[in-house]
């Protein structure tokens, strides 16, 4: 109600009239009309309150007139302050009072109210408030919903990443909303411009047509186009709706990625289509529940035998594809449990009725909102047949191998033949297998048989009909396999037919057993239950088994011959054993004689050589300082007397008589040079060394070399050996450079034996080279051994000589030193080998030789060994 009307209604001159009018109006108002008198003393008197008080405040007018303060208690706590301030301002300024706020009714309802009033100052100084309080809850709720809606739509609008343009009918940009990164031009560069100015001509034309169509039809229109941007060519989609008089709102979205995804999806669809149609495996798409085919490829047509139009809309049950109907139920349960099946083996029936085996892989897919099964069938029928053939071949090979082992390990022919026919029948699953003998003296008879108890046995069957026997022999006389799949379909004599009827033979497979070129018999398999197709692998088995049987028979015959020869052989062996024992006794006697002769000759030679050496050294010592000696018969003064002595030269024959001088008192002296005496001494030394070496070799060959190794420091050991060898080096004007490190680990060695080895090796170098030889000794650790090397700068030798240097063999007779040195080299190898090492020689490329040998390192176990 207007405030002017309220003011008029409460004017003093028309108060009663106003009250009557207000009472009529207040009944139909959704609010409350009131008149409040506020006196100067602060008291409040309420002359009038309309019945709307009950609707608005849930209070009777009398309750409000009795206590005006009850209104304050109903005002919302958050709005009480604003209410009080509004009253104070109105009273102070005498301006119209206007307030909106919330109240809470006694029943707990929250309401929005709006109060208006015009205060009037009375003559007595009192204030009269005439006003109206209205319920504006619905309006406030509508405003809140509108604000929420506006906020929501603003949030939605802000959240939309698409470009938005307001465009007029003639193509002018009126406004836009965009993100900075989604547009390359600024707002000022776009608003007010026309489509023709900013877009390529073709895109502008498409956009203009879409705008006109949107405004004319009033419906949503879409259009797609491409624009060149700094990021490259991009695809956009514009959605146009009417937004005002002759203007549209265009929502522009970048759909480049979607377009690319669509292209990728199209390519994938093409690839899937090609893979589906060109796959060598059968592929089907069928409904999940019924199994009704929705699509099949060409490989399915080829595999099943059903044309595409015969399979589409049909189920596998209707086409009778499942050999076992339960397989489809098991497949469905597996798919529903896991969603996928991989390489499950099933049997399927082709249109022709042939049973095939396939591996089935399937997945549940969503096809236009319907659950479907994508299944791939890989035909493995041939593979299964090959596997079965391989298993059969393996079984055949095992049977052949076991038969061969039995033949080689057993001499019991009867047992071999019986086991053979038993296992062959089991392999062939035949009704009867037997081995027949063809013998001119014994006739035809069965050696071994394995037969099903349901059918008669051929054991014991015989006949005296020679013509019939000859016919049977003629069937196999050319060493050919006899294959009969149905005995009723071949042409044979009535006797053969009668024989087959007697033993219920329907099919037969016979393989000859040949001993050389002679027909010994046959290995025969019979099928009595009906005709039979004999497979190549079965024929091959019988052929190979017949060869093994022939070997067993030949082996048996050989064993019989061997048994006959065994007695003679044992007698011959006894005779030969006696002869060998006699020869061994004779050889033992010869060895004893050899040892006696060797030691006797060596003893005599040693005595002679040592005597010669004593004589020669005495002569050499007596003639020191002179260049020659007189040798002959003469006298020597001794104790004032002259004594006649006789000295014999080693070069003179025994019992030689020397002529006396003319007076008969002294012989004529024979002059011998010093160098001859020295050479004679050297020769006797070599002979003595060789004799000692021969005796040592003979001893080590019989008893072995005895060494006493102990842990020693190799540098200390070699230092002592060098001191012993120093005179020999000085005599030959040789130098020995010792490069052996002092910190080398301990070795296990016999010092005395090792000294002989080093002496022999150095002697070899000195005797085969002129004076002035230079030698270098070194040592190193290699793989748990110490390697010792002696290198000289003398004359080298061939590889053959290096290889044979340490062997015991006959030396060159023209080399006077070779035999003695060779024996020493042989002894060196024996000594090093007894230590557990190796020895050798290397001929250097430029000049000289390098002798080397190895010795084992001393370990904790060898050091602590007692």
Image (spheres, helix red, strand yellow):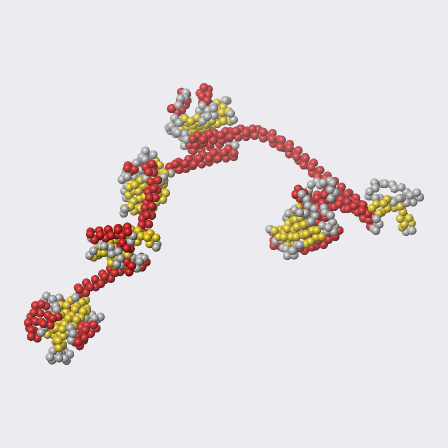
**What residue appears at the point 20 percent right and 52 percent down from the top-left corner?**
216
Q: Position of residue 440 (x, y in %)?
A: 50, 22
Q: Nearer the viewer, residue 271 or 644?
A: 271
The residue drawn where x is 28% and y is 50% is: 202
Whole-percent x, y for residue 241 in the image? 23, 54
**Left or right of 133: which side holds 220?**
right
Nearer-the-camera pick, 382 or 693: 382
Picture quadrant where residue 805 is located: top right
Relative to 696, residue 388 above or below: above
Residue 405, placed above or below residue 645: above
Residue 396 x, y percent position in the rendering = 45, 34
Most foreground residue, 533 or 370: 370
Q: Is residue 439 visible?
A: yes
Q: How many marks?
A: 0
Q: Is residue 677 left or right of residue 551?
A: right
Residue 674 x, y percent position in the rendering: 82, 47
Furthest-right residue in this view? 663
* Quadrant of the rendering where the N terminus is positioned: bottom left
Answer with left or right where residue 589 lies relative to residue 103. right
Any part of residue 422 in sight: no
Residue 43 placement, left or right of 731:
left
- The residue lying at 20 percent from left, 74 percent from top is 85
Residue drawn at 65 percent across, 56 percent down: 742
Report which quarter residue 527 is drawn in. Answer: top left
């Amino acid at each position: 109600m207007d405030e002017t009307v309220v003011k008029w209604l409460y004017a003093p001159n028309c108060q009663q009239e106003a009250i009557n009018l207000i009472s009529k109006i207040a009944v139909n108002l959704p609010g409350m009309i009131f008149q409040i008198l506020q006196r100067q003393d602060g008291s409040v008197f309420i002359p009038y309150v309309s019945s709307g008080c009950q609707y608005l405040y849930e209070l009777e007018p009398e309750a409000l007139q009795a206590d005006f303060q009850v209104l304050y208690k109903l005002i919302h706590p958050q709005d009480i302050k604003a209410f009080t301030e509004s009253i104070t301002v109105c009273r102070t300024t005498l301006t119209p009072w206007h307030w909106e706020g919330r109240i809470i009714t006694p029943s707990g309802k929250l309401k929005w109210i709006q109060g208006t009033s015009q205060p009037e100052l009375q003559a007595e100084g009192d204030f009269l408030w005439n006003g109206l309080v209205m319920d504006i809850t619905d309006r406030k709720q509508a405003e809140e919903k509108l604000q929420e809606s506006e906020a929501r739509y603003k949030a939605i609008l802000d959240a939309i990443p698409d470009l938005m343009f307001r465009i007029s009918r003639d193509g002018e940009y009126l406004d836009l909303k965009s993100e900075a990164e989604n547009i390359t031009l600024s707002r000022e560069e776009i608003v007010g411009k026309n489509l023709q100015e900013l877009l390529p001509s073709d895109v502008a034309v498409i956009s203009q047509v879409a705008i006109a169509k949107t405004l004319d039809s009033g419906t949503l229109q879409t259009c797609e186009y491409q624009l060149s941007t700094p990021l490259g060519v991009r695809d956009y989609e514009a959605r146009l709706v009417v937004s005002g008089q002759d203007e549209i709102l265009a929502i522009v979205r970048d759909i480049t990625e979607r377009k690319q995804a669509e292209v990728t999806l199209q390519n994938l669809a093409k690839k899937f289509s090609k893979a589906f149609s060109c796959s060598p495996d059968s592929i089907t798409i069928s409904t999940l529940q019924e199994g009704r085919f929705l699509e099949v490829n060409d490989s399915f047509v080829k595999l099943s035998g059903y044309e595409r139009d015969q399979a589409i809309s049909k189920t596998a049950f209707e086409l009778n594809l499942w050999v076992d109907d339960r397989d489809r139920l098991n497949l469905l349960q597996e798919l529903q449990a896991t969603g996928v099946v991989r390489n499950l083996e099933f049997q399927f029936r082709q249109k022709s009725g042939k049973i095939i085996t396939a591996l089935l892989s399937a997945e549940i897919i969503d096809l236009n909102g319907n659950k479907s099964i994508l299944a791939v069938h890989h035909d493995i029928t041939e593979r299964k047949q090959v596997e079965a053939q391989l298993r059969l071949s393996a079984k055949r090979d095992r049977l052949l191998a076991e038969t061969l082992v039995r033949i080689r390990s057993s001499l019991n022919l009867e047992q071999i033949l019986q086991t053979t026919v038993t296992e062959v029948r089991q392999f062939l699953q035949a009704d009867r297998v037997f081995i027949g003998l063809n013998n001119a003296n014994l006739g035809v008879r069965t050696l071994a048989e394995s037969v099903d108890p349901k059918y008669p046995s051929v054991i014991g069957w015989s006949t005296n009909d020679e013509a019939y026997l000859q016919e049977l022999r003629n069937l196999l006389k050319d060493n050919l396999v006899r294959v009969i799949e149905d005995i009723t379909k071949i042409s044979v004599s009535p006797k053969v037919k009668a024989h087959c009827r007697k033993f219920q033979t329907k099919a037969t497979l016979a393989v000859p057993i040949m001993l050389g070129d002679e027909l010994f018999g046959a290995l025969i398999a019979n099928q009595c239950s009906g005709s039979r197709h004999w497979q190549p692998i079965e024929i091959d088995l019988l052929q190979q088994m017949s060869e093994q049987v022939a070997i067993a028979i030949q082996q048996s015959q050989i064993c019989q011959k061997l048994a006959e020869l065994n007695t003679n052989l044992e007698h011959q062996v006894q005779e030969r054993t006696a002869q060998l024992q006699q020869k061994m006794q004779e050889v033992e006697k010869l060895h004893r004689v050899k040892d006696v002769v060797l030691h006797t000759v060596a003893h005599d030679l040693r005595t002679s050589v040592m005597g010669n050496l004593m004589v020669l050294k005495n002569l050499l010592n007596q003639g020191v300082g002179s260049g020659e000696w007189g040798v002959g018969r003469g006298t020597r003064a001794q104790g004032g007397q002259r004594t006649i002595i006789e000295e014999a030269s080693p070069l003179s024959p025994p019992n030689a008589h020397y002529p006396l001088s003319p007076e008969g008192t002294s012989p004529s002296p024979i002059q011998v040079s010093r160098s001859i005496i020295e050479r004679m001494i050297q020769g006797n030394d070599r002979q003595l060394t060789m004799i000692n070496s021969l005796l040592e070799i003979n001893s080590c060959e019989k008893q072995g070399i005895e060494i006493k190794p102990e842990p020693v420091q190799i540098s200390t050991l070699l230092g002592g050996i060098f001191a012993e060898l120093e005179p020999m080096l000085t005599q030959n004007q040789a130098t020995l450079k010792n490069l052996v490190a002092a910190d080398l680990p301990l070795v296990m060695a016999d010092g005395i034996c090792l000294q002989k080895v080093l002496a022999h090796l150095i002697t070899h170098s000195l005797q085969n080279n002129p004076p002035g030889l230079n030698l270098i000794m070194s040592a190193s650790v290699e793989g748990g051994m110490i390697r010792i090397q002696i290198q000289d700068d003398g004359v080298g030798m061939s590889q053959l000589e290096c290889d044979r240097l340490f062997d015991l063999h006959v030396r060159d007779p023209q080399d006077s030193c070779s035999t003695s040195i060779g024996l020493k080299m042989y002894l060196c190898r024996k000594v090093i080998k007894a230590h557990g090492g190796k020895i050798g020689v290397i001929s250097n490329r430029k000049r000289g030789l390098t002798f080397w040998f190895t010795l084992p390192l001393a370990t904790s176990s060898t050091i602590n060994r007692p």
